[in-house]
Amino acid sequence: MAVISSLERPGWRTWTLWAVGVVAYVVSIVNRTSLSAVGVDAATRFHADASALSMFAVIQLFVYGAMQIPVGLLLDRYGARPMIAIGMVLMAAGQLVMAFADAVGIGILARVLIGAGDAMIFPSVLRVIATWFPAQRAPVLVQLTGIIGQLGQIVAVVPLAALLHATSWSVAFGSVAGLGVLFAVLTYAIIRNRPPERRDDPVDLSVDTQTGTIRVVTSAADLRQGFRESWAHPGTRLGFWSHFTTPFAGTAFMLLWGFPFLTAGEGIAPATASGIMTLFVLFGILSGPLIGALSSRHPRRRSRWLVLPTVVFQAVVWIVVAAWPGPAPVWLLIVLMLALSTGGPASMIAFDHARTFTPSHRLSTATGIVNGGGFLAALLAILFIGIAMDVQGAGTPATYSLDAFRWAFLTQVPLWLVGGIAIVVERARTIRHIDGSLPR
């Protein structure tokens, strides 16, 4: 492998490429969470019970997770420019189908297209960072990309919901489709796979984030062997279970069930509910740098001091909300948003585990395994909540009730327990695997 290093200061063109990529990621988050504030409207439009409504998000998350390895292979072959454009087109097609869909099956097809397109954006933007920027800037830019991208959730919760209620379902989702087409053209026109001076470089680049070195990969390992070797390392499994356990509650709340719970369950006005859900994003932006700083300062204790306490915080607050006599006060719902918002930043520690314990030539495979954990848990949580609502006879907007939502959200507890136990077990195995001491 050849080593490429760059100490050049990025110019305006490089920053423009990154800015366009980041805004494209914001648009992908808008597409991903476009049902978050209109779940009740979706249930009415599709005449769907809670389980059927859950399938919209479950199928979308399944497709997103299943596409991670294929997207990585396509990125290696074709680069970020066409992948971002194709992802935008797929999401636009999905939103156009959703704009005119009136049956559950067609709606699920729309979410499949959206999930497939969404899966292409974030890895492609990371590749732009790795290719165009000096290696030492990459970790900061990756964090900034993730933080800024979450602003898309605010767009989905507030302006999109307002547009739908002011116009119609078709106009609202058709507008999102048009936005996707616009950014497909914009990204293809502006983004380039690599700088002009590296036009002849191979496309397959990877970043060793432990040392900050950009490497050109000249050979590809067997995929199945790489997967087996990555999963065999307890550090990869520790990352998988860390990502499995921390973010799923916030994903399930923001992606589908939060708005119906706040409005139909807690009896909160839609505008107030949108404001409460917006706090999830704002708290995440504030807590992310803090958790990241603590993780970097205490890498030997991040599972015990950050990951597990975050899980306990989320579980305890949810149990308090579920046990509260009558509707929960607004201050408690705000605390719930704070608790759920810590899951996303804490889940990034899972990638620190993969980076710390995985050889650089298997880092992408290990990262894909870790990333799959969070989406697996999220789709299980969304599905369990929907099934629990149906079992209680509260599967449609007309039958939603606060008690039904409380019991439904408690189905998340087993996922926290399984994940928490697995984290403890794999942490011990990881310590034994590396002869008893975690890296400083």
Image: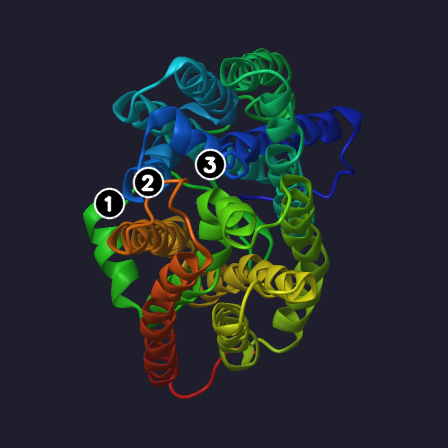
- Looking at the image, tell me whether mark 3 or mark 1 is earlier in sequence order: 3
Distance from disc 2 to disc 3, alpha carbons, whole Å, reads 34 Å
As shown in the figure, which amino acid type bears the numbered disc 1? Leu
Which image quarter holds the N terminus? top left
Q: Which residue is mark 2?
A: 69
Q: Residue 398: which disc? A: none
As shown in the figure, which amino acid type bears the numbered disc 2? Ile
Which is more toward the observer, 102 or 377?
Answer: 102
Q: With respect to residue 165, does 29 lie above or below?
A: below
* Number of on-image labels: 3
Q: Tell whether 61 sits left or right of 99.
A: left
Distance from disc 3 to disc 1, alpha carbons, whole Å, reads 42 Å
SS at mark 3?
helix
Judge whether residue 136 can be spotted in this image: no
Q: Tell whether 183 sits left or right of 304.
A: right
As shown in the figure, which amino acid type bears the numbered disc 3? Val
Q: Position of residue 377 (x, y in %)?
A: 35, 56
Q: Position of residue 433 (x, y in %)?
A: 33, 80
Q: Which residue is mark 3?
A: 40
Q: Residues within 10 Å of mark 2 (few under 14, many from 20)?
A: some
Q: Which residue is mark 1?
A: 223
Do tag 1 and tag 2 residues touch (Cβ < 8 Å)? Answer: yes
Which image quarter holds the C terminus? bottom right
Which is more toward the observer, 201 or 254?
Answer: 254
> Residue at 62% of width from left, 49% of height from top?
268
Q: Nearer the viewer, mark 3 or mark 1?
A: 3
SS at mark 2?
helix
Which is more toward the observer, 33 or 285?
Answer: 33
